[in-house]
Image (tube, rainbow, N blue to C red):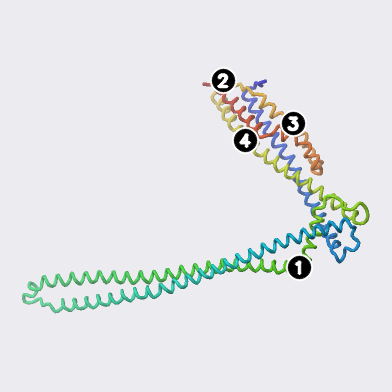
């Protein structure tokens, strides 16, 4: 069934629902803060228990271990030993690859140096040839200058030697131009050599930097490999004690001192698992509400534009017909807010938080429902503005 309301009321309606979304967002954000704080606190407590009890599981201190706990520890040690063997194989492969890469970097550096050495005599020869040609041109210019000086001007030399003097001057000018080209060529050869040296220096610095990085990485991997090969038994047991305690979600023993030791740890592990699930849910819900709020903001701007036009130009008042898809969707906010309002309590109850919001989020705030709500609101506003046409 459609709901009819004036444009002014519709404008107020969408802004009210936008505010409710913000209010719910803040409530859930407070719950998220508490979840994070309690999760961190429990993690610290859990780490202290693991640090306290892990050494007591090592062979030298584990004479009084219950049989069930001893069996679990032995099985975990075998698992950890296999994992370390796989890590050793991976390290050996990675070290071989990095050493090969380092060798290739050295070979490339040597190749570049050899290339520059090959270029040096070639460029030297080009320069010497150009210098020899320049010297030859300089001598030709001197010869022509001398010949010009010996041509007489008087009494009628200016007339009889005119054409010869002009030819000699043209030859001098051409030689001077060629001499300039030779000087330019010599300068370019020298610039080429300097550029090659600069490029080599930069390339060598880059290759050296890469080689140093690879060498450091190789040294770190080699140190890890050497340690594991030497201490695989000890490391397997240490990893076994830590991981057995870290992943323990039920008590392996029914009575005794170890039951008293492990019960708080198991409870913290289970509680943390619940907080991790709830933290993921909180992040997803906050993301959903943020995206929904941004969509509402865009739509509110559209309604505001239409409403301002109606007021400014004193246009006929519009009536908006909202479908049930819109009204039923926004009817969820009071219910949603009521379920998350007690953030202080819910911040300590991740399971209860999950239970309260599960149905609302999955059944009433799905992607299809959100898309349908926006489509219907947009269609309703479009149909309402047709009255002005």
Spatial CA span between label 1 and label 4: 59 Å
Give the secondary structure at mark 2.
loop
Q: Nearer the viewer, residue 185 or 125?
A: 125
Give the secondary structure at mark 1.
helix
Identify residue for label 4.
295
Give the secondary structure at mark 3.
helix
Front disc: 1 or 4: 1
Front disc: 2 or 4: 4
Figure check: 301 above or below 260: above
Q: Which mark is residue 334?
A: 3
Image quarter for residue 341? Answer: top right
Spatial CA span between label 2 and label 4: 28 Å
Front disc: 1 or 2: 1
Q: Residues within 10 Å of mark 2 (few under 14, many from 20)?
A: few
Q: Is residue 310 left or right of residue 56?
A: left
Nearer-N-terminus badge (2/4): 4
Spatial CA span between label 4 and label 3: 19 Å
Q: Residue at x 62, y 68 (%)?
A: 216
Spatial CA span between label 2 and label 3: 33 Å
Nearer-N-terminus badge (1/4): 1
Figure check: 302 above or below 349: above
Q: Residue at x 62, y 27 (%)?
A: 376
Q: Position of residue 387 (x, y in %)?
A: 55, 20
Q: Which mark is residue 231?
A: 1
Identify residue for label 2.
316
Spatial CA span between label 1 and label 2: 86 Å
Give the secondary structure at mark 4.
helix
Nearer-N-terminus badge (4/3): 4
Front disc: 2 or 3: 3
Q: Residues within 10 Å of mark 1 (few under 14, many from 20)?
A: few
């Amino acid at each position: 069934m459609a709901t009819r309301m004036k444009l002014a009321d519709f404008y107020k309606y969408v802004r009210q629902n936008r505010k409710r979304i913000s209010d719910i967002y803040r409530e859930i954000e407070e719950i998220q803060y508490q979840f994070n704080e309690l999760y961190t606190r429990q993690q610290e407590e859990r780490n202290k228990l693991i640090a306290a009890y892990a050494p007591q599981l090592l062979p030298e201190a584990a004479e009084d271990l219950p049989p069930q706990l001893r069996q679990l520890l032995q099985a975990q040690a075998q698992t950890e030993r296999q994992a370390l063997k796989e890590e050793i194989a991976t390290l050996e492969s990675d070290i071989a690859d990095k050493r090969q890469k380092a060798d290739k970097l050295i070979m490339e550096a040597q190749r570049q140096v050899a290339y520059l050495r090959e270029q040096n005599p070639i460029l030297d020869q080009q320069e010497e040839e150009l210098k020899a040609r320049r010297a030859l041109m300089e001598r030709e210019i001197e010869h022509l200058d001398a010949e010009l000086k010996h041509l007489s001007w008087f009494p009628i030399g200016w007339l009889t030697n005119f054409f010869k003097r002009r030819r000699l001057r043209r030859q001098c000018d051409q030689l001077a131009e060629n001499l300039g080209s030779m000087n330019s060529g010599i300068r370019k050869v020298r610039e080429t050599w300097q550029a090659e040296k600069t490029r080599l220096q930069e390339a060598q610095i880059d290759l050296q930097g890469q080689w140093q990085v690879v060498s450091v990485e190789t040294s770190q991997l080699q140190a890890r490999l050497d340690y594991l090969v030497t201490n695989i038994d000890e490391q397997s047991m240490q990893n076994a004690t830590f991981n057995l305690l870290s992943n323990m979600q039920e008590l392996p023993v029914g009575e005794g001192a170890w039951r008293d030791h492990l019960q708080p740890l198991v409870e913290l592990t289970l509680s943390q698992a619940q907080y991790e699930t709830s933290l993921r849910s909180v992040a997803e819900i906050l993301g959903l509400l943020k995206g929904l709020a941004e969509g509402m903001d865009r739509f509110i701007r559209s309604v505001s534009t239409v409403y301002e036009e109606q007021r400014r130009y004193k246009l006929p008042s519009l009536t908006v017909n909202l479908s049930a898809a819109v009204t039923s969707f926004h009817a969820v906010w009071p219910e949603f807010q009521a379920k998350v309002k007690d953030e202080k309590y819910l911040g300590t109850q991740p399971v209860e938080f999950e239970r309260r919001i599960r149905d609302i989020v999955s059944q009433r705030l799905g992607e299809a429902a959100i898309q349908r709500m926006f489509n219907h609101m947009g269609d309703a506003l479009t149909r309402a503005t047709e009255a002005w046409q």
